[in-house]
Amino acid sequence: MSGHWWHRNVIFRNEQVPELAISSRDETTPQGLWDALQAVCLDAGTGCDVISIPHNPNYSDGRMFNIPDTITPDEASTRAAMEPLAEIHQAKGNSECKIGVETNDPLCNFYQKFPVDCVMNPAAAQCSPANFVRNALRRGIQVEGQIGVNPLKLGIISDTDTHNGTPGDTDEFAYQGHKGRIDGSPELRLSTTGGEAYNNGGGLVAVWAAENSRDAIFDALRRRETYGTSGTRPKMRFFGSWGYPADLCDQADLISTAYRKGVPMGGDLPPIDANATSPKFLVAALKDPGTDDHPGTQLQHAQIIKGWIDPASGRSFEKVYEVAGDPNNGATVDTSTCETSGPGSDLLCAVWQDPDFDPAQRAFYYVRLLENPTCSVYQFDCNKIPPEQRPATCSDGSFQMVIQNRAWSSPIWYQP
């Protein structure tokens, strides 16, 4: 039912899988799914291994990341072990955060759909913080401070959720819809009555694995060394340490040094160094190269989002820091042609030190990487229709016509 989804993607390590799939008819709660997977996979003695990934939380009606105050350490441990990742973006909308839902971050307004639109329905449960990944990360460290276990220690992925059997087909300029004839033309997609509410081109997950094998990729998913994108293909690294040198970006061996002296995205900072005043983080990104016909978009800037808990009150807070590039670089896009202009970067790299670090405060950090502005999939669709035939939705503000594609890293956590 729309607005009440508890969908999970269930990912197995190898071909050792249960004889029958576990459906929502068998288990109606996430806890039931995890118990069943434990019984028929993890404890089966067959070599079966599995994780589940929360899918489309922005449609969950506040259920996906709802953690009751009565949760026990054992329950929290089970959840953390079974669900090391969460989906932050897909064709049916973005699930990072929502303006007015524990944040005033303006960049949260990105490819969001009506089921999470608190302006359209301010009394609805869809406004719950438990629909959004950033709020889940905040809730997780809050619970950890209370019971000693973080049930929402979530790495980040994105995906398409296409129903057309075209995985990886996320180019907005070539968008063909996600549901065959229901949304197979620009006219259908731009109609407020055609098909479902308008989707976007979907996202992609990137995995830093030791090799291109199923085992290595599964291990990387489990340790959360992953990031998600809104459909483009930038390369991004994120590491944390107590002792990175300020000139690390200039060193030829920056990645090996980053591993040797710190932890990658998805990890925990080691115990605080006696000689350190605050943690340091390496952010490095390369633009999506694109193709000869459709070059990738320049990078504009990179941010680190920090969430923390005040130990005295137990309340959670957040702050967005600019760490590389320039959010006011003047880059623009001509919506009539979707041609971009203005400065940007092929590469962004910075070592950033938290200026507000308090060793008593439990915290997490993740990167949000922004590209220069481009046309959205909606504007591309409008431009495919002769001007005199375009529906009102091309000009009445129904859709977000200019966007900034982006990527989100898995967090790095700090525990006092």
Image: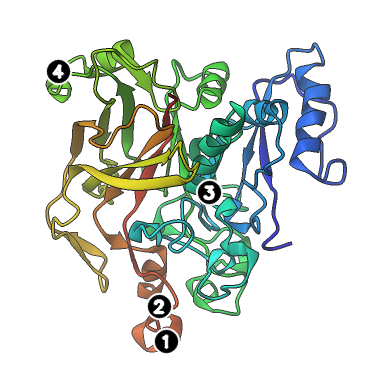
> CA gap, disc 1 to disc 4?
56 Å
> Crowding at label 1, few (<14), some or many (≥20) Cα neighbours within 10 Å?
few
The residue at which mark 2 appears reads as 385
Marked residue nearer the N-terminal end (1 or 3): 3
Residue 340: name its quadrant: bottom left
Figure check: 172 above or below 277: below
Numbered disc in front, either 3 or 4? 4
> CA gap, disc 3 to disc 2?
25 Å
> CA gap, disc 1 to disc 3?
29 Å
- Answer whether labels 2 and 1 touch (C-beta < 8 Å): yes
Would residue 362 be visible to someone looking at this image?
Answer: yes
Q: State how many labels appear.
A: 4
Marked residue nearer the N-terminal end (1 or 4): 4
Residue 176 point in image, percent of width and height: 50, 60
Marked residue nearer the N-terminal end (3 or 4): 3
Figure check: 145 above or below 66: above
Which mark identifies residue 300?
none
> Crowding at label 3, few (<14), some or many (≥20) Cα neighbours within 10 Å?
many
The residue at which mark 1 appears reads as 389
The residue at which mark 4 appears reads as 251
The residue at which mark 3 appears reads as 160
Numbered disc in front, either 2 or 4? 4
- Answer whether labels 1 and 4 touch (C-beta < 8 Å): no
Name the residue nearer the viewer: 39 or 137.
137
> Crowding at label 2, few (<14), some or many (≥20) Cα neighbours within 10 Å?
some
Marked residue nearer the N-terminal end (2 or 4): 4
The amino acid type, in three-letter code, at marker 3 is: Thr
Numbered disc in front, either 3 or 2? 3
The amino acid type, in three-letter code, at marker 4 is: Gln
> CA gap, disc 2 to disc 4?
50 Å
